[in-house]
Image: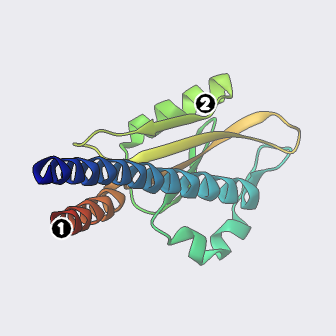
């Protein structure tokens, strides 16, 4: 009887630990994705193309907290990049392809890079003052800090479960 209780206890702790680890991972990545969206929308709202297609970044450049929060932002026009803040985490030719695709179909793109090239990216179309699609805002983040935080949580969870 004591052995069955011990086995049931251990199995329960393992199952609950697995559920907690899975929920934590999903929550961490959802939070990063929400930060990406908020960053892209902030750039979208603070930088714009006027009716003549001229890009204006005067306001967004004054927002130093936005431009130094670990998320890179780029804006592409039909001619190429017109604004960039943060580090280059994705190859310029990949960014240009993504911008071309968003300009062509008007649909946002979300990408997550693999282990060798880790990034999370959100690209959203933007319009000029005449409601003509003319640009793309791209926000890029490095998911490795999120993964490290999650691994730390899992290690702590395992240590507690082992007690």
Residue that protrudes farthest toward the front in the picture: 1
Q: Nearer the viewer, mark 1 or mark 2?
A: 1
Residue 129 percent across, percent down from the top left? 87, 45
Crowding around mark 1 (Cα neighbors within 10 Å: few <14, some 14 to 19, many 20+) is few
Residue at screen point 32% across, 59% down:
150
Disc 1 secondary structure class: helix
Q: Is residue 9 above or below residue 153?
A: above
Of 122 and 149, nearer the camera is 149
Residue 1 percent across, percent down from the top left? 14, 49
Left or right position of 162 against 82: left
The picture quadrant where one finds residue 66 is bottom right
Residue at screen point 73% across, 69% down:
59
Residue at screen point 42% across, 50% down:
23
Residue 142 percent across, percent down from the top left? 37, 55
The disc placed on residue 148 is none
Looking at the image, tell me whether mark 1 or mark 2 is earlier in sequence order: 2
Of 37 and 42, nearer the camera is 37
Left or right position of 160 against 60: left
Of 75 and 122, nearer the camera is 122
Crowding around mark 2 (Cα neighbors within 10 Å: few <14, some 14 to 19, many 20+) is many
The disc placed on residue 102 is 2
Disc 2 secondary structure class: helix
Name the residue that disc number 1 marks: 159
Left or right position of 132 against 159: right
Left or right position of 66 against 19: right
Mark pair 1, 2: CA separation? 46 Å
Residue that protrudes farthest toward the top in the picture: 105
Residue 39 percent across, percent down from the top left? 60, 58
Location of the C terminus (image quadrant)? bottom left
Task: Give the total of numbered labels.
Answer: 2
């Amino acid at each position: 009887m004591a052995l069955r209780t011990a086995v049931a206890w251990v199995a329960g702790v393992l199952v609950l630990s697995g559920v907690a680890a899975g929920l934590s991972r999903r929550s961490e990545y959802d939070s990063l994705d929400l930060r990406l969206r908020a960053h892209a929308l902030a750039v979208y709202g603070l930088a714009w193309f006027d009716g003549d297609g001229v890009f204006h970044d005067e306001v967004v450049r004054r927002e130093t907290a936005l431009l130094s929060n670990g998320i890179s932002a780029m804006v592409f026009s039909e001619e190429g990049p017109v604004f960039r803040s943060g580090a280059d985490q994705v190859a310029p030719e990949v960014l240009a392809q993504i911008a071309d695709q968003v300009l062509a179909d008007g649909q946002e793109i979300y990408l997550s890079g693999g282990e060798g090239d880790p990034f999370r990216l959100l690209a959203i179309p933007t319009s000029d003052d005449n409601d003509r699609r003319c640009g793309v805002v791209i926000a890029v983040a490095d998911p490795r800090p999120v993964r490290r935080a999650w691994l730390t949580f899992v290690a702590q969870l395992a240590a507690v479960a082992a007690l």
